[in-house]
Image (cartoon, rainbow, N blue to C red):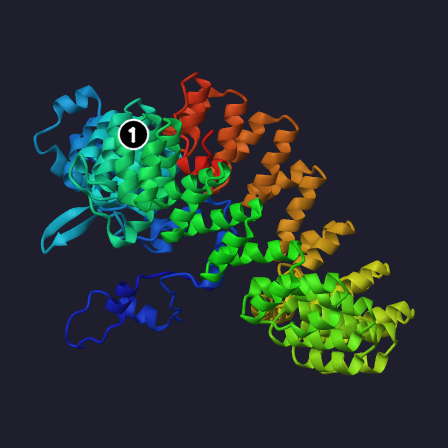
Amino acid sequence: MVMVGTLWPGEFDERTAYRVQSEPYMQDNDQQLLDLASVIDVPGAFSAAERRRAEQLTADKRILVALRAFDAGFTQVLAAGPQLLRRWENADPTDSKQYCGKAVITAALDARRVGVNTPVSAALLAAAAPAYLSSAQRATAPEDWFERAISYSTTLMHGATACLTPVAGGMGQVAGWVTADYLYQCALQMRRTAPIPDQAWQALLDHHDPRESRFLGESAVRWNRPEKAIKFYEKAATAGDGWAACELADLLDADDRAGEAITVLQMFVEGQPGPKVTLSPTRQSVRSELVSKLAGLLIGEDRIDDMRRLADAHGKSAATWFVDMLLDHGMTAELRQRADAGDWEASRWLTTSLQAHGRVDELEERADAGESLAQVRLAELLARQGQLDRLRRRADAGDRASQHHLAFLLAKKGRVGELRRRAKAGNQSAANRLVELLSTHARTDEALAWLRPNLVDWHAAKEVIEVLVQDQRTTDALAALRLYADSGEMWAAVRLNELLVDLCRVDELRLRAKAGDWDANKRLLDLLVAQNREDELRQRADDGDAKAADRLVDLLIDQDRVEVAITVLQTQADAGVWEAAYRLVDLLVELDRVDEAIAWLQPRADSGAWEAAHERDRQTRLKFFVTQDPGVRSSFCTTAHKRLADLLAEHGRIDELRRRADSGDTVAAYVLVDLLAETGQADELSQMADAGNLEAADKLSELLLTRGQVDEAIAVLRSLIENGSPFATSRLINVLADHRRLDELEQEVNAGTSGAAERWMELRGFVPRRRRPDPRDRVYETGGYRETP
């Protein structure tokens, strides 16, 4: 007979520690018994592998809850958990210590439900707990009810943990209490849809940790308590939380209190009319959101003076919207004044307007004052009007916009001599137009003499080079392309390689490929395949060129030498080239050799070697593809597990797929679930869901909804929520709303489910929250400026 028992380490040490033989020992028999035992030390926590195996047993809710608890060990939670639950649920309603203790525990649990992560203070618990008592219980409670309640709720169960655990605020001082994780996990299920009493919300508002104000405001919104959310956000905003100020402004505006919303935002953005609030450096990113939200309110309320002050204080971001506002009011005189004062947005509107009305002199005055937009608009206008002399003067004075438009105008008029003079002086615009003009008039030799990467751009150079190719002057074309390719111009490298292939210049192409030109390498391989150069392809493949191996396989398949191609792929795959492994499997499947493909995949999926090689290569290629050919990028998500599972599913090998899933292959389990859902096998999905497979439950809910089995789908979604699925809540809200299940939707509001309050109010006929249009959208639509009529 074998006996197995467990003992706490302290108890074991006490019974086996060295002792003086002459002293009496009450547990002498215990020591003699333990001396006969084989002792196995059990760690206080699961290893990663043990935890993964335990997580697969999610059908047993006790295991799931114990795994999520962090305030006590797994075994301690399993041992003390039921005691904690009984102490909370089964308090004697006639014993003030017990029923007050239960109320305090419930208040602490509800506080944690709505987002309190810091220890709950005595003040909060004392203010909230009466909300969970009947009138008679409140009337008969003794004066020291709170101390008695704390004594009840902090009693240790099985010496492991208590419903509430004190947190030190100093030596001999209690800062607050935290709830047992096990109890909290149970409460999340048992009280998920229980409403939070008004008095508890008020207690949270009066006694919460200021660091949690914004988060509690977000919770109040989810629980459809906008009035409480406003108060929480006010506290957070007062402490300098800019994001809270944004949310507060939205709530106030939705409540037709736009003036108050503006005041809140002004305290952050301008410091007026209330006390200025300074954002910490880590919160500077919120400033643009504050400015845009304030601008939207000011525009909506037509407060032009406030908007002017905002534009003056925040430059371009607010000035753009203020320009639109001035235009709406026809205040063009002020726009001119702002443009004269250096307002870039006003200047953009004014210069565009002056150009549209042909006001050359005024534009030139602004351009001479150094206004870059005016210089551009003036050059465009002078070129449109054909005013060569004025363009020349400005170009000679160094105006780049005038140089650009002058060159186009000279080319249009065929002024080769002037373009040549300006090109010799280093004017790039003139050089580009000159080269284009010369090549158009068949003066290719002269155009060729001007080709230099730092003078003539790619567009003009390409035009000349194509003329050379057409005239079969390939030597000159190659020389020009090399010049630009060596300077880093990608278009030139690609065109050079293309021309080398056309001319069968294999040696130069090989040199360029060796130097790292990926396009040259690709074209070289294409050329070797076209010329049946099997030996060179094989040599390059043996040297580690995976692309050469791939093209060698193409050549062998074209020659009907499939077995040789398979051998090449197997060699490459065994060397860790995962693209070759992919192609080998695909080729075997294409040849209807599915059994062979599966047999080849199975040991590699089980060993994980393919995945390791795949990951190493993936990291290398991710860096490579930053600057190299994106056209040869392959999928990085497929692994041997996934390919094998997909293959089994595609060919109806559901039993093999099920065996792999049952043996712990998570990828196979996912593919199996998808296959069962696609084929409508609800019964097996239900069995897997009952066994704790969340993916199966998710797919089952979708399948039931498509069949119109709404009640069954809702039940599945609720079980998913209980197991912590992050996606089930939003789907449940949509299902309840779509089928107008108002009572159940209200329960989700009580649970604080995100989005439930909005859908519930919508279905009850309440006007949804009004949100101002973002001025940034308006700028995008208008292009940032408008011309005056």
Determine which residue is flagged by label 1.
304
Q: Quadrant of residue 785?
A: top left
List x then y, in percent, for residue 657: 70, 53
Judge from the rendering whether residue 439 lies leftward or rightward of residue 178; answer left or right. right
What residue is at 61 percent from the left and 30 percent from the top?
Answer: 705
Three-letter code, disc 1: Ile
Direction left: furthest residue:
143
Front-most of residues 504 and 122: 504
Residue 367 shows in this picture: yes
List x then y, in percent, for residue 739: 54, 22
Judge from the rendering whether residue 760 lies leftward or rightward of residue 239; answer left or right. right
Q: Quadrant of residue 19?
A: bottom left
Q: Quadrant of residue 683?
A: top right
Direction right: furthest residue:
560
Front-most of residues 338 and 602: 338
What residue is at 16 percent from the left and 52 percent from the top?
Answer: 168
Q: Say above or below: 136 vs 774.
A: above
List x then y, in percent, for residue 161: 27, 50
Front-most of residues 14 and 26: 14
Q: Say above or below: 501 vs 761.
A: below
Front-most of residues 93 and 493: 493
List x then y, in percent, for residue 318: 34, 40
Element class at badge 1: helix
